[in-house]
Every structure is written in C-alpha cells, then in structure tokens.
Amino acid sequence: MTDTTSRPRRWLVTGASRGLGRAVAEAALAAGDTVIATARKPAALNDLVAAHGDRAVALPLDVTDRQAVFAAVERAVELAGGIDVLVNNAGHGLAGAVEEVSETQAREELEVNFFGALWCVQAVLPVLRRRGGGHIFQMSSIAGVTTYPNLGLYCASKWALEGLSETLAQEVAGFGIRVTIVEPGEFRTEWSAGSMVRAVPLAAYDDVLAKRRHGLSGVYAHLQPGDPARLGQALLEVLDADPPPLRLLLGRGAAELAPRVLRERVAGWEPWRELAEKVDFDA
C-alpha cells in the first residue's frame, strides 16, 4: 500500500465538537497533521486547540448555510495553506415513524445530513482539483445500507448521501481525488441521547415501535460496542491505502449485517426476473 496523500496532511472536519468527528480530529492531530475543526459552537473545541497549538483551529460553521460553508473553506485554506482531507461528519439523528415526523423535522434532517455534505463537497472540490488530489470521507451509517423502523428519515438522508457519494467518486477519480463512504455501526457516542431529534409520537404506533423507541431513548448511550478512537485510527489507515475502499464498514455488527442485507435483496429480486424482462420491447 502506498500513501497517496501528502504529509503532514491538512484536514477539514465538520461536526467536530463531539462523537465521531471529535475522535477523527484527535486521531489526525495525534498523527502530526493539521486540523481545521468546525462546529456550530466552536467553544466546545477550546481544549483541542489549547492542546495542539497552531495545528488545531476551530471555526464556527452551520453546514446548512451554503454561503457560510464556502467562506469557512476559504478561511481554512488561508489558515492551513490548503486542504488535503475533508471529513463530512456534521449530522444528527431523527427518531419517529414516517407518519409522525413533521415537515420541519424532515426538511431539517435532509438539510444537515444531505445538503450540508453537498455544500461542503462543492466548496472543497476546487481546492482539491488545484492541489491535484485529496481524500473525501463521507460519514454515512449502516443505516445507509439497510433501514430501521422509527428512523425512516435518518435512513433516507444517508441513502441519499450514499448515492451522491458513489456518483461523486466516479466524477472526481480522474483528478486524483479519492472518496470513501464510511458506514459505521453502533459507536459509543451521544448519538441516541443528546443529538437525537424526536417526533411527537402517535398512539397508533405505541405497540409497533415500543422496542425501537426504548432503544433510541438514550438508555444505551455510551454502551455501544464501537470505539470512536479506533474509528479515527481506521480513517488514517484508509488514507495510506492504494486504492482505498469506496465503502468502509466499521464495527463487527455492521460488517456482519451489510452482506446479509445485500444477499436478501438479491434473493428478493430473483423470483421476479421473468417479469422484469417482459416489460422490454421484443427483440
């Protein structure tokens, strides 16, 4: 394997104040790289900046504001001299049955998880093209591969991100830009507690979603099997890979579940193969 990204590397990490974004930023800094870490409330990153001097910079950023995203990328380039790695991590969860979520909640979920990532990609690509390469990590989820009751809009946002990212990878490969879709399973963060938005429940779903609602209530926060610090190290390993993976499952549960889901999908198509072929014009 060959390192395809210059060292020390310059990272732009969104949603870096906590959780997986914070773990990635810490791993990059521990490796001697420079990190421009963004968050809605950058004061949460003061300790990271204090510990690493001018190799860590915190910037305020709401990724749903496209103009602010472009301004932040421009500022990051001024401060670091360029960008080598983008980690599109900013996002949040939305719990609720498809019928339960409000229009505002649904739009906000896509604004952050999908459009926020799109704006960051659009802002960073000119920088990477001028540089002649780089790496974009799109932080998806195992929920971008399969689906879960009570998480329909969250899953939809990640499926949209995966479709965008796979297309993106094809479009930018000729510029030497690598794209990796990161698909974590359950990691020990506050995702199901502090960062989860919840729809107003309908009584009709009380029995159907009882188990799922309990699981997303925050009761299991910080009990998940995945270690965020090891996820950060895994991304460093991917940067050294040639070629790197387009999709990266992280966590034993995710690595076991995704292949099973895809096998079930193929098995569901096969009985309808004859019908699929009947809709074409005759040869």
Image: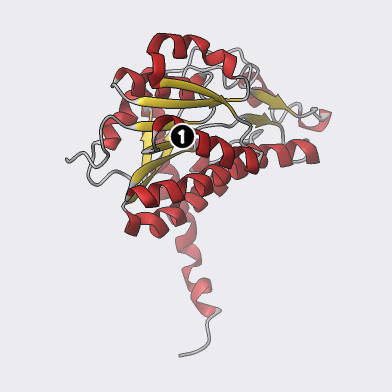
Number of residue marks: 1
Residue at 41% x, 59% y is: 171
Q: Is 227 on the left-hand or right-hand side of 152?
A: left
In the rendered view, tell whether residue 43 sits above or below residue 126: above
Q: Which residue is drawn at 35% across and 24% down?
A: 28
Q: What residue is shown at x 34% (from left), y 47% (from top)?
A: 131
Going by the image, does 204 lie left or right of 197? Answer: right
Q: Which residue lies furthest to the right in this view?
A: 203
Residue 102 image point, x, y percent: 80, 37
Alpha-carbon neighbours of circle 1 within 10 Å: few (<14), some, or many (≥20)?
few
Quadrant location of the C terminus?
A: bottom left
Question: What colouring method underlies this structural image?
Answer: secondary structure
Q: Is residue 226 in view?
A: no
Label 1 SS:
helix
Query: Residue furthest toward the bottom?
Result: 283
Q: Residue at x 58, y 32 (%)?
A: 91
Where, quadrant-wise, is the N terminus in this rendering?
Answer: top left
Residue 241 percent location from the top left of the image: 23, 40
Query: For this view, does 65 lie left or right of residue 244?
Result: right
| Quadrant of the rendered image containing residue 135 | top left
Residue 237 percent across, percent down from the top left = 27, 31
Residue 125 in the image, given as x and y percentages of width and height: 45, 49
Q: Does residue 104 show up? A: yes
Q: Nearer the viewer, residue 104 or 53?
A: 53
The residue that disc 1 covers is: 78
Viewer-proximal residue, 4 or 129? 129
Snapshot quadrant of residue 251: top left
Q: At label 1, which amino acid type do we have?
A: Glu
Q: In this view, does 19 lie to the left or right of 129?
A: right
